[in-house]
Amino acid sequence: QVQLVESGGGLVQAGGSLRLSCVATGTISSIKTMGWFRQAPGKQRELVAGITSDGSTNYADSVKGRFRISRDNTKNTMYLRMNNLKHEDAGVYYCYGNQWVATMRYDYWGQGTQVTVSS
């Protein structure tokens, strides 16, 4: 069983920066894919960025060039560095990870951390 706990959200002015962290209990090296999703009020949860166990990354078009995802398996932690934040980046950010055991995939989610972007 893996648990994911996010931190680092908060209130930031437009143009500012935040770094989100996601700490996993257990060993995240066994987690194949991790990522950050966000959900704004009234909208569906969307993928912001993903990272595989070998370090390959992908980003939503809306955050390319501004956000950077990384993971440190020695610290069981994944990060999301968010620069030049815009109002449309606001929402609850969720940490995600999946783990394969034989042919079964297990999905894990954190409880979410709020990001608010002010004018």
Image: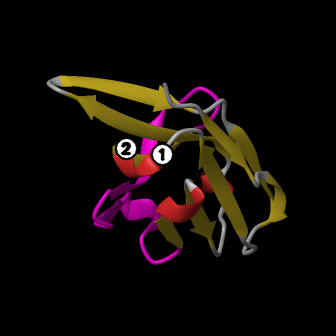
Q: Residue at x 74, y 42 (%)?
A: 114
* Residue 19 percent across, percent down from the top left: 69, 65
Which label number is shown at residue 27?
A: 1
Q: Residue at x 72, y 75 (%)?
A: 15
Q: Is residue 70 above or below residue 99?
A: below
User: Exactly how many numbered labels are in the figure?
Assistant: 2
Q: Which residues are magenta?
A: 39-66
Asked if the stretch drawn in magenta spans residue 61, the answer is: yes
* Residue 93 percent across, percent down from the top left: 61, 43
* Residue 27 percent across, percent down from the top left: 48, 45
Real-space CA distance between mark 1 and mark 2, rounded to the nearest whole angstrom: 8 Å
The residue type indicated by label 2 comes to Ile
Find numbered disc 2 in the image and state the secondary structure of the residue it sits on. strand
* Residue 82 percent across, percent down from the top left: 62, 68
Asked if the stretch drawn in magenta spans residue 33, the answer is: no
Find numbered disc 1 in the image and state the secondary structure of the residue it sits on. loop
The structure's colour scheme is secondary structure
Q: Is residue 71 above or below residue 26?
A: below
Look at the image and tell me in which quarter the C terminus lies: bottom right
In depth, the one of 71 and 83 nearer the eye is 71
Say which residue label 2 marks.
31
On the question of residue 39 being in view, the answer is yes
In depth, the one of 54 and 7 nearer the eye is 54
Are dots 1 and 2 in contact, CB under 8 Å? yes
- Pointer 2: residues within 10 angstroms few (<14), some, or many (20+)? many
